[in-house]
Image (cartoon, helix red, strand yellow):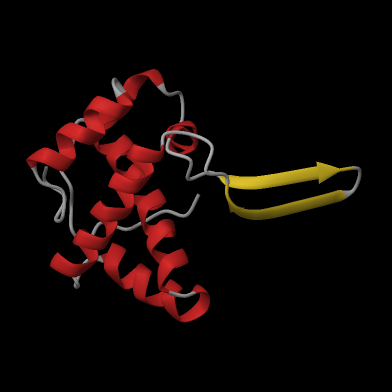
Amino acid sequence: MTIPGVGAYRALLILAEVGDFRRFHRKGALASLAGLGVRQTQSGDMDARGNITKDGNGLLRWDLVEAARNHIRNSPESDLSIRHKRLTKKRGVKKATVATARVLITIMYAMVTKNEAFQVNAPLKSD
């Protein structure tokens, strides 16, 4: 609940849908549970990456996108919001918001596994 835009109800919903965060061996596995993983198709020398897979928990994905929207609205000075603005110029608002939701779930994973609170302007690492 230390993340701006994530209140008690949203935090409980995410916790109920994910369960124990520590059961995932990496943050990408948690993003895949939410259906926020990148679709990848490989055949021979061809390697194509596309939109999100949408395979996974739709309620969790919706909740994370709403949390990302709330975070961007309530904390415009955070690095996550600045990243969203930069992506909006390249990809559009909807894709930037979904990308922000993916980063948000990876931040939540790091927070729970390291037992730390959210830091507004902590440097974001790309996947």
Residue 113 in percent (x, y) is at 29, 28
Quadrant of the frame with the N terminus: top left
Picture quadrant of residue 8: top left
Q: Is residue 101 left or right of residue 95?
A: left
Q: Is residue 30 visible?
A: yes
Which of 105 and 26 lies nearest the eye of the viewer?
A: 105
Measured from the top left, where is residue 126 in percent x and y?
47, 54
77 up-or-down from 56: above or below: below
Q: 45 left or right of 72?
A: right
Residue at x-position 25% and y-position 35% = 14
Instruction: Please determine whether, in this image, residue 23 is positioned above or below residue 100.
Output: above
Q: Which image quadrant for residue 70? A: bottom left
Which residue reaches farthest front? 59
Name, please, the residue furthest toward the right. Answer: 44
Q: Residue at x 31, y 72 (%)?
A: 82
Write the residue at 23% across / 29% down. 15
In the picture as drawn, the residue positioned furthest to the bottom comes out as 89
Q: Is residue 83 left or right of residue 116?
A: right
Q: Position of residue 114 (x, y in %)?
A: 26, 31
Q: Is residue 75 visible?
A: no
Q: Position of residue 72 (x, y in %)?
A: 23, 66
Residue 123 placement, left or right of 58: left
Count of marks placed on residues: 0
x 40%, y 72%: residue: 93
